[in-house]
Image (spheres, rainbow, N blue to C red):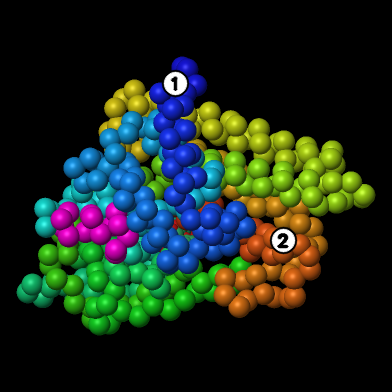
Amino acid sequence: MDLRYTNDELAFRDEVRAFLKDNLPEEIRQKMIDGESMDKQDLVTWSRILNEKGWAVPHWPTEYGGTGWDPMRQYIFLEETQKWPAPQPLAFGVNMVGPVIYTFGNEAQKKRYLPAIANLDDWWCQGFSEPGAGSDLASLKTRAVREGDHYVVNGQKTWTTLAQYADWIFCLVRTDPDAKKQSGISFLLIDMKTPGIEVRPIVTIDGGREINEVFLTDVKVPVENLVGEENKGWDYAKFLLGNERTNIARIGMSKQRIARIRELAAKEMSSGRPLIEDERFREKLASVEIDLKALELTQLRVVAADAKRGNTGKPDPASSILKIKGSEIQQATTHLLMQVMGPHALPYHTGDADGSNELPIEPDYAATAAPGYFNFRKVSIYGGSNEIQKNIIAKAVLGL
Ligand SMILES: Cc1cc2nc3c(=O)[nH]c(=O)nc-3n(C[C@H](O)[C@H](O)[C@H](O)COP(=O)(O)OP(=O)(O)OC[C@H]3O[C@@H](n4cnc5c(N)ncnc54)[C@H](O)[C@@H]3O)c2cc1C
């Protein structure tokens, strides 16, 4: 299998690079390089620039705004945007609920929701997990009872990322408590302005405020907001979770972080010489780079196989391998960045605009290393924990 880019693909890569250079606002790029968190407006601005170009939802079918790129071009686009680095689109809309709506939704839902996702007019969040229903998601208890032309929803969702900004939440709810647990679940679209919804922040270990609890008390949801058929929500959720994993390796992001580690390790001194000249440090860096190269080749093999099969829209079970290795490498790079900063990483910015745990010691850029390190512990948990991915590999890849 030849995994090198063709001349056409190289020309496409240059086109993407030129677009990023000319169109991503410099202050947003700088925040990405410095590891600062994006605010809502940054993402809205960038999503609208992409949408204007027709590149906001490249993997969607062309009739709903997709580009018609083959899997290799999709991959090149993803890698280049991560490497630049540009913000990634809001996954809850673009990668999760959007594909569910165009695959299982009705015409009215496609018309109402898809353009607003592409332009980030609607900010979506994901209401799947509950206390007691994470890996074992089908144990969820949030209840929806049909009363005439609406459902009445009661329950609690948790770990709901960026719900504080959300206009809409897509929720798994139990509509038939007597059915086998996977069979009694439905997929509802809920307007966050509906009375009875309360969002409470969960402060993360890095001081960030990106996740929340969402409480639903007697929330009235019109029946027209049901996606697909009642009690078939588990099928739509499986489809969504498979898509969630496909782009989770974030190879471009790790490449960008390794370039940053090299740049900063050339400035930071250790025992009288730049850290990058220290053999032990170079050994650790090389080991992560080798893992990343191997992951890139695995990803390219998955993409090439996908291109050959024709894009079926069904995730390859090998995406679980990409998720495990990708998240381990992302964590390893945040660890290396902490090592580069050494004691300078101790005073750090928290997610609050005014927040720092101590006065900074020079240099300024060190302040995001520790929160980044702590924050990235999450990548081996969300999107299906790495232990669960190993179960999937055992069954679906190794046939055990
Ligand atoms: C930062 C962050 C953001 C998130 N954002 C969202 C969001 O926006 N929306 C949303 O719905 N959810 C979100 N989640 C929730 C996430 O999907 C769950 O945390 C995840 O599915 C794990 O569930 P749990 O936390 O309940 O852990 P548990 O399921 O209780 O697992 C605890 C531990 O046991 C292990 N384990 C569990 N079952 C098995 C098994 N069968 N075999 C082997 N090991 C097992 C797990 O791997 C884990 O290590 C987010 C989580 C985090 C950390």
* Image position, residue 343 (x, y; %): 80, 62
Quickly name the residue at label 1: 6
Q: Name the foreground residue: 66 vs 229.
A: 66
* Image position, residue 338 (x, y; %): 72, 56
Residue at image coords 87%, 50%: 270
Vertical order, 127 against 220 (above or below): above
Vertical order, 17 against 190 (above or below): above
Asked if one can make out residue 202 in the rendered structure from this viewpoint, the answer is yes
Q: Amino acid at mark 2?
A: Ala
Q: Which residues are magenta?
A: 109-122
* Image position, residue 349 (x, y; %): 65, 70
- The mark tally for this picture is 2
Q: Among all residues in the image, which is located at the extreme left?
A: 148
- Relative side of 170 to 112, left or right: right
Provide the secondary structure element on which disc 2 rests: helix
Does the magenta-highlighted stretch encompass residue 31?
A: no
Does the magenta-highlighted stretch encompass residue 121?
A: yes
Q: Amino acid at mark 1?
A: Thr
Provide the secondary structure element on which disc 1 rests: loop
Residue at image coords 72%, 46%: 263
Q: Quarter holding the C terminus?
A: top left
* Quarter residue 143 falls in: bottom left
Residue at image coords 27%, 48%: 99
Asked if one can make out residue 377 in the rendered structure from this viewpoint, the answer is no
Vertical order, 212 against 259 (above or below): below
Residue at image coords 50%, 45%: 21
Q: CA distance from mark 1 to mark 2?
A: 40 Å
Ligand 1 within 8 angstroms of badge 2 C-beta: no
